[in-house]
Image (cartoon, rainbow, N blue to C red):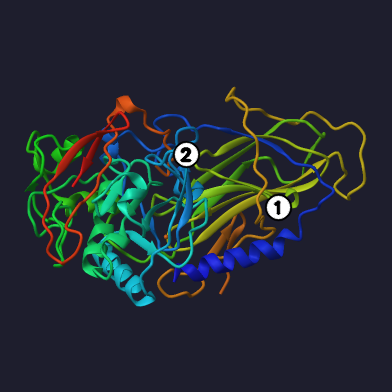
Amino acid sequence: MFAHLFTTLSTLSLLFAADADSELGQFAIRPIPPEHGSSALTGIEPEPHAAWDKPPHRHTVYLNFDGAQLKSAAKVGVNAAEGTAGCVTGQLEYPAFSGTDEERLAIVEIFKTGVAPFGIRVVHEQRPPKHLPYSQIMIGGKGELLDAEPSSIFTCATDCGDSWWRETGFVFADSYPGEIQVLGDAALKVAGHHWGLDGLAGFNYIMNSFISGLPRTWSDRCVMTETSQPMCASVHDEFCGEGSKMQNDTAELLAMFGPNSVDDVPPTVHLLSPLDGAVLAPGQEFTVEAEVTDNFDGAGWRLMIPEAGQELPAYKRETEWVLTPPKGKYTIRVEALDHDGNVGFDEATIYVGVEPDGETTGDMPDTSTTGGDTGDTTGDTTDDPTGEPTGGFDPTTGSPTSTTGGSGTTSDGDGDGLPEAPDSQDGCACNGSQGAGHGWLGILLLVSLAHRGRRVRRS
């Protein structure tokens, strides 16, 4: 299980946090945004109309039964790892699932079965690492939390072509206690909206707006959408013909995620700068630049400075950072993680105001390079810095997977993008499914209404 990976990462983080030197200062870190048109792996995600110009990417869905503190994405963008959601105003303490452990596991099994044909990983026991792109589905509470009664689900947006990767959606489990099939299918429907799927007219499909306790499937042929103006018509037309107003779920999911297969190949990281052994003066800017590649798109990475206790997830998939260092000897590491728990890294040691043997030096030569004008940002201090590369585990078996560094492979024994919060003129679609307050076969119709100045859809 991927949970073994997360537990191992957390344990290693606590162990290596002791390696951080409390007498050393903090780096100022300024990420350089990737250029538009970069690939999904090494740059920002493409616009929805270009979603099929890139290869499939792997993805992880976190089914959150444990509750969380959520907050508005208005200033910082949509990011499940930071608890920001596009349809949350202010702060929201979202409750945990009130059902039994057996019910929780049964819902997880329905969801896993639904996505099993595709390159999608599902976790629920522990939140994934921040630098791994993942979406989140909150399972618990009632629709009144988001002014969404009597809906069974609520999604903040329909992400055409899955170009974001870090959304949060909601299944109101307390409104349907004990109705496992309903809740499992509802979670799949939320995920479908996250991936750009619209509602379908057929009652036997996951993306249909009616609620039923009977098992459902993704459409494997072109089926009429529920509305005459589907949100992601331009993507659906790629598979069903221009102006068809139809959608083929399976074809789109295969295009986005590819068929399911085991991935035992770690990402490859090449640190282009700084050079290992670089000597700098305190306060002298220099650029960290890396190349990250993998056999599947979708991996995430982070910049790490273990001795300073700092790390910065590459939420916008940046591969360049401008750093201003304090005095000391430091490791500059870029570490990548894929959706099967494989880890790759590269690193370099720099000497700032000290000789390579640790003695204080005189004047340092100017060997710095700087990036473009990207505005000021501050580096974060992490509560879980790691002083060594962290190995991964196969999320399905819990067995160790490989770790690669810049000098080769060793063995230790699965958006994203970060979009800006959509403003009201962009037509963000909030989705919900509503049904009877009890019973397995409640059938209710699609409801459309205005909500916070955005186009809202409840189903």
- Vertical placement of residue 66 versus 399, above or below: above
Q: Are marks 1 and 2 in contact (CB under 8 Å)?
A: no
Residue 392 visible from this viewpoint: no
State the CA–CA distance, disc 1 to disc 2.
33 Å
- Vertical placement of residue 326 versus 149, above or below: above
- Vertical placement of residue 136 versus 245, above or below: below
Which quadrant of the figure has residue 406?
bottom right
The residue sitting at the bottom extreme is 102
- Nearest the camera: 12 or 82? 82
What residue sits right under mark 1 in the picture? 306
Count the marks. Answer: 2
What residue sits right under mark 2 in the picture? 90
Front tag of 1 and 2 = 2
Indicate the position of residue 171 as horizontal and vertical percent values.
Answer: 31, 56
* 1 or 2: tag closer to the N-terminus: 2
Q: Residues within 10 Å of mark 2 (few under 14, many from 20)?
A: few
Q: What residue lies at 34% left-to-right and 77% top-to-bottom?
A: 102
Q: Residues within 10 Å of mark 1 (few under 14, many from 20)?
A: many
Looking at the picture, which amino acid does disc 1 mark?
Pro
Q: Say whether residue 270 is left or right of residue 431.
A: right
Indicate the position of residue 437 as horizontal and vertical percent values.
Answer: 20, 59
Looking at the picture, which amino acid does disc 2 mark?
Gly
Q: Say whether residue 51 is left or right of residue 30.
A: left
- Nearest the camera: 208 or 285? 208
What SS does tag 1 mark? Answer: helix
Q: Point out the image quarter for the N terminus.
A: bottom left
What SS does tag 2 mark? Answer: loop
Residue 35 visible from this viewpoint: yes
